[in-house]
Image (cartoon, rainbow, N blue to C red):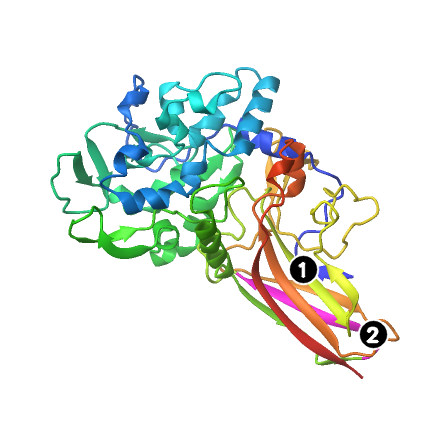
Amino acid sequence: MRLVRGLPAATFRLSPLLILLGLSLSGCGNDSITDSPPIAQDTALTVDDFETATSCQTCHPVHFEQWSGSMHAYALKDPTFAALREIGQSLYINALDGACIQCHSVVARETGAMPWGPFDYDALPPQVQEGVGCDVCHVVSGIRSLSGADMIFSPGETKFGTIADPVPNSAHKSEFNSLYSSSEYCGSCHDLVTGDGLQLEAVFREWRAGGFAVTGKTCNDCHMPDSLGSAVPGGPERTLHDHSMVGADLALIPFPNRPEQLQKVTDMLRSALTVEWDLPPTVSAGDTVDLQVRLINDLTGHNVPTGVPFIRQMWIAIEVFDDNSLIYTTGELDANGDLKDENSAFAESEIDEDLFNAQATMFRADSVKTGLTWEARYLDNPSIVAGETRPVDYRIPVPPGAAGPLRVEVRLRFRSFPPYVIRALGQDALLPIDIIDMWEDDRTVAIL
């Protein structure tokens, strides 16, 4: 049996549909970043006030190409978003849409351009189709609160950015804005607080509380790394920022630059944690191998995993072989590709009692587990906090007849979506979900 200094396995099967649906319905609260009164939002914006991303392509081909494969460009194309929105609207009339599109299509929220109910994607204006397009980000003139994309949008001739000495041009005016170098700029979208004050997404708060905030390292330093080049063809050399905006997510459908995006996501995840492990050099047949894995968050400025922690799966997989015979395993998948926990279709017969999975669980005020975010009052989140070392201990039985040497293989694995959620949405065609090995190692143990 494994002795884990973390959370025990859950004892019930969460409703995967309601986990995600609840996120869409949760709405948001406020975390003001300024003591001054908020600037009034222009409530008369139209779709045509925003430029299309393709209109930026001629002058900014490199940035456009990078953005095209990003999760910002994918936001409204995501089939899980469309499925959840349709289901949510059928269940909660007049209580859903703003919470969905506030992040997936800011232009739609600001202009009312998305029709109620099921929608024909191809019939939407291109500014809406583009999800989080160029103009959405580069016309932000201020932030009201750090939740739910509560920004001040000022579309028009002036585009904001980080270049202090922009070259005058005929396409638009350019203006330096220090906000664009700050983590607060990212935090407005990448934190989500429910109306009851529960932090469901807390990437910015995690960074601010104990991550790289103390070192001055910002979101951009990791997720939009610098390079030298021209912002426009023939322009002066600048410090550019990668608009792939890599995180942990990947498109679940064929999408521009997906192989390159997968490699970037893999590289980022493989540099997210330091992993150490201890294993004795020898063991007697019939005894147990005491194995400890230590997950050390000394490389990332926020929790790992983060984002929507009740969906992210990061788990330890161990296989022990005597010659070529498998004598122990944990972290393996069932026939459907799910982990062998309470969400497995085979949970009654195939529970992995030693499984360590850093996926969070939501609870109601009466401490009963729930998959509904509007019921949730606190989150039991076993993700690895910035600066934390998490030991995970295993006692692995060795058969009396083992000849040895034993080969022990350990992996730390990650995926952004559990298959059981995809199946619950009727999106089986999106399977399988990419699994990324964040770390792996193997050693041998001699039998005395």
Residue that carries the numbered disc 1 in the rendered image: 317
Which percent across, then down, holds residue 349?
A: 84, 47
Q: Is residue 282 magenta?
A: no
Q: Residue at x 23, y 38 (%)?
A: 160
Q: Is disc 1 surrounded by few (<14), some (14 to 19) or many (20+) residues within 10 Å?
A: many
Residue 324 against residue 15 in the figure, above or below = below
Left or right side of 9 for 401: right
Which percent across, then down, holds residue 416?
A: 56, 46
Q: Of tags 2 and 1, which is closer to the observer?
A: 1
Left or right side of 278 for 119: left
Which percent across, then down, holds residue 442?
A: 64, 72
Q: Residue 184, can we see it?
A: no
Q: Secondary structure at mark 2?
A: loop
From which residue to which does the magenta span run? 284-296
Q: Quadrant of residue 397?
A: bottom right
Q: Residue at x 47, y 51 (%)?
A: 259
Residue in the foreground of this view, choosing between 284 and 114: 114
Residue that carries the numbered disc 2 in the rendered image: 287
- Which of the two labelled residues, at mark 2 and mark 1, occupies the earlier sequence position? 2
Amino acid type of the residue tagged 1 in the rendering: Ala
Measure the alpha-carbon separation of dots 2 and 1: 21 Å
Q: Residue at x 78, y 64 (%)?
A: 328
Residue 109 against residue 434 in the figure, above or below = above
Q: Is disc 2 surrounded by few (<14), some (14 to 19) or many (20+) residues within 10 Å?
A: some
